[in-house]
Image: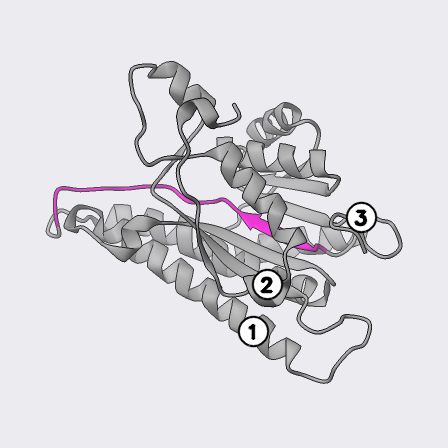
Amino acid sequence: MSVTSMGDGRPLRVLVTGGSSPSGIAAARALLQAGFAVFTVGSDKARIEEAAETAGGPTPLVCDLADLAAVRELQQELARTAGKIDGVIHLVGGWRGAQGITSQTDEAWDFLERSAVTTLRNVTRVFYDDLAASPCGRFAMVSSTAVGSPAAGVASYVAAKAAAEAWTMAVAEGFRQDAQGPEDPTRGGQHSAAVVFVVKALVDASMRSSQPERKFPGYTDVEQLAAAAVGLFSQPAAELNGQRLLLAPVPAGAAST
């Protein structure tokens, strides 16, 4: 099996959630260019279709990932029309901040819990069996360096990200336990992995062009994130599984935009 295809020659199928975001567009484009069959998901039909066109033609799909029944319908539709999914790059998130602990609002927490935690729980629960069965199953989410040094003003944000990370590590443990079961000679040991990409924040070309005076110190370009997503499929699952992978920032001039 090559990096991007199965033993029968068909391309690995990768689902990019949050597909209408700049990071989703970059990831979909990079995966397509690498030879994967790519499906992008968004909650707004017009936006995800426009994003898919910008990304070069992944298959756009509409789904509210915070709705478990809707995610199950999405998985069933994909299984019926395209086949089981080999990878999920989960790029649904969002940010909310405040002045301190006492100004953390329930509205902000509800938003963050829904976008950062509920969507991830739903996607991993529904697509886990697909990823576990794939000879090259991969799941990745994006977290923040702030989780390691939480500040009062972003308490809700870092708590939601920490919960999402913990869930992802549990998914990784599930893959590890699967690999310790009865050996399947067709799979060659552990073949699925879940990882966390860690960044300070993400930046894209439109952000740079709209704020040319700003340096975005410590930010990671979405193109670097996209390249890292592609690279997951060429690295051994046993080495990747359960890793927090820090994506070091690159200078603006060095980032592909």
Name the amino acid type tagged 2.
Ala
- Looking at the rendering, which quadrant does residue 162 occupy? bottom left
Does the magenta run of residues contain 2? no
Q: For residue 56, what is the image quadrant?
A: top right
The mark found on residue 193 in the picture is: 2
Which is more N-terminal, label 2 or label 1?
Answer: 1
Using the image as rendered, state which of residue 208 and residue 42 is in the foreground.
208
Residue type pointed to by label 1? Gly
Residue 128, horizontal then vertical, whole percent:
62, 64
Check if residue 95 falls in the magenta segment.
Answer: yes
Disc number for residue 174: 1
Query: Which element type, helix, strand or loop, lies under badge 2?
Result: strand
The label shown at residue 57 is: none
Picture quarter with the N terminus = bottom right
Residue type, numbered disc 3: Thr
Q: Could you say which quadrant of the image residue 53 lies in?
A: top right
Above or below, 191 against 199 in this view is: below
Q: Earlier in the sequence, mark 3 or mark 2?
A: 3
The residue identified by callout 3 is 81
